[in-house]
Image (tube, helix red, strand yellow):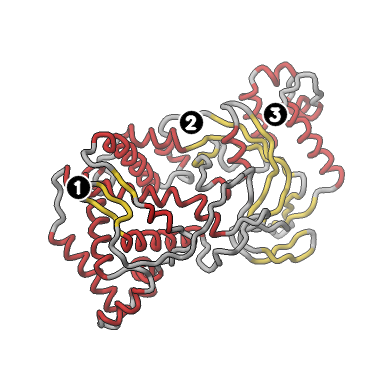
């Protein structure tokens, strides 16, 4: 059994230097955009909350920043700063420009929205401070912000939400088909995988119970020969090679195999693949600097391929949950993230068919709300790039920004737990 926290998939990271912890409740400006600004305390709040949500989303809440998460010694802190700092800065950028758009569009916050902000602050103070504002101030001080910071950030976030609602609708009803298609075509990959398992097979006894056993030597030899033929055919495209298994079992000549490799690939998928759950192929977000380190080798291969080309990678089966498993008569303990190699996977990059995100057969790859949220985010960022050129104000940033890092920021457990963890709101 092989184990990993994060696999290094052909990735070379530029590791940032991590500065010392910087905590301040100061009012110096980190960003300014004319009359709009992000001050030190607001920036501290934002990066602390970002870090807390990021750790929760990645499942690293109980992990130290100094924990090595790759075979080459990359620490969790280095990973977060080198991969996610740009995303955090972009979130601050959009928040700030949204304030200007809010005024440009002539929007206002309703009394209900303003009261909601005050009620949230009051509930947070009462919960953590035991209905004592002074007690809460002592608690919140270590996080580097104040009650006034919470009010200003909540207000800015409410204005950003108002802008997004104005542009795209509360339920994405104003999000155009063009915006969805643009996001889909720029963010996703479409590929198919033929998996040849040369390690084990499933057997069912008389009572209908399924178990897994290793292949016999002759069975493994046959699978190894098939892997060799598929490599020559699909990856190397070697017309001079011999294909005894494939030609015999498909009833085709070598010339017929090469006449249309796309059609041949589909026939091979139906005939041999150990995984045929998605005959239409996989739709997955292309690797980026923020996710390529945890990307499967099949997705990484598809990213590098030209449309219609094939690559072969090691087939791996991951365990989402820990437990025990019987392998060849032995009981082994497994952890979430463990995997074993069980053959080869032949990855073929396919074209992105129009509107795949709206088709029923692809629902496992496209969560509607998540997809629309990301399409909206993409559309808003595109709008801001144009707005930045036309905006009367010039964005300025202070060198104070370089004093902060995700690693050294104090994760905002205080506000996060109240806003997102149900166990705290039941009190």
Nearer to us in this view, 109 or 219: 109
Q: Residue beneath label 3, please?
A: 235
How far across and down, in percent of the image, does residue 40 sit? Answer: 33, 60
| Element type where label 3 sits in the image | helix
Q: Residue beneath label 2, please?
A: 352
- Of badges 3 and 1, the one in the foreground is 1
Nearer to us in this view, 275 or 181: 181
Q: Residues within 10 Å of mark 2 (few under 14, many from 20)?
A: some
**Which mark, by number, is residue 171?**
none
Rendered residue at 34%/74% (across/down) = 141
Q: Does residue 324 appear left or right of residue 174 in this picture?
A: right
Q: Does residue 355 appear left or right of residue 246 in this picture?
A: left
Q: Residue furthest front?
A: 399
Rendered residue at 67%/63% (across/down) = 334
Q: Does residue 249 appear left or right of residue 191 in this picture?
A: right
- Sequence-earlier tag: 2 or 1: 1
How far across and down, in percent of the image, does residue 236 sit? Answer: 72, 26
The relative height of residue 264 versus residue 144 in the rendered view (above or below) is: above
The relative height of residue 142 versus residue 188 in the rendered view (above or below) is: below
CA gap, disc 2 to disc 3?
21 Å
- Sequence-earlier tag: 3 or 1: 1
Q: Residues within 10 Å of mark 3 (few under 14, many from 20)?
A: some
CA gap, disc 3 to disc 1?
54 Å
**Which mark, by number, is residue 102?**
1
Rendered residue at 61%/44% (across/down) = 11
How far across and down, in percent of the image, does residue 1 sit? Answer: 73, 58
CA gap, disc 2 to disc 1?
36 Å
- Of badges 2 and 1, the one in the foreground is 1
Q: For residue 323, which quarter of the picture? A: bottom right
Q: For residue 153, which quarter of the picture? A: bottom left
């Amino acid at each position: 059994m092989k184990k990993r926290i994060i696999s290094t998939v052909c990735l070379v990271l530029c590791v940032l230097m991590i500065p010392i912890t910087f905590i301040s409740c100061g009012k110096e400006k980190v960003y300014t955009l004319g009359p709009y600004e992000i001050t030190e305390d607001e920036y501290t709040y934002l990066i602390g909350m970002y870090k807390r949500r990021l750790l929760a989303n990645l499942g690293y809440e109980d992990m130290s920043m100094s924990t090595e998460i790759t075979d080459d010694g990359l620490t969790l802190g280095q990973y977060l700063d080198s991969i996610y700092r740009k995303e955090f800065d972009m979130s601050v950028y959009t928040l700030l420009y949204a304030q200007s758009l809010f005024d440009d569009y002539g929007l206002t916050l309703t009394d209900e929205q303003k009261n909601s902000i005050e009620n949230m602050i009051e509930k947070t103070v009462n919960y953590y401070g035991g209905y004592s504002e002074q007690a809460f101030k002592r608690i919140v001080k270590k996080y580097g912000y104040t009650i006034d910071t919470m009010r200003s950030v909540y207000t800015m976030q409410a204005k950003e939400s108002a802008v997004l609602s104005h542009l795209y609708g509360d339920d994405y009803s104003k999000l155009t088909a063009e915006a969805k298609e643009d996001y889909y075509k720029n963010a996703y990959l479409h590929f198919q995988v033929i998996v040849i398992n040369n390690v084990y097979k499933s057997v069912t006894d008389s009572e209908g119970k399924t178990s897994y056993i290793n292949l016999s030597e002759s069975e493994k030899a046959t699978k190894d020969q098939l892997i060799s033929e598929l490599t020559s055919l699909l990856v190397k495209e070697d017309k001079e090679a011999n294909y005894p298994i494939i030609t015999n079992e498909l009833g085709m000549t070598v010339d017929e195999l090469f006449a249309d490799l796309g059609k041949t690939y589909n026939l091979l998928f139906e005939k041999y693949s150990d995984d045929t759950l998605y005959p239409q192929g996989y739709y997955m977000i292309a690797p980026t600097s923020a996710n390529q380190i945890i990307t499967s080798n099949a997705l990484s291969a598809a990213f590098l391929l030209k449309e219609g080309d094939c690559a072969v990678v090691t087939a791996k089966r991951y365990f989402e949950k820990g437990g025990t498993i019987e392998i060849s008569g032995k009981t082994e303990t497994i952890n979430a993230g463990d995997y074993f190699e069980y053959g080869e996977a032949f990855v073929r990059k396919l074209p992105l068919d129009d509107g795949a995100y709206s088709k029923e057969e692809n629902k496992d790859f496209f969560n509607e709300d998540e997809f629309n949220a990301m399409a909206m985010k993409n559309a808003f960022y595109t709008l801001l790039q144009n707005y930045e050129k036309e905006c009367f104000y010039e964005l300025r940033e202070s060198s104070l920004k370089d004093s902060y890092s995700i690693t050294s920021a104090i994760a905002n457990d205080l506000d996060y737990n109240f806003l997102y963890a149900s166990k705290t709101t039941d009190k």
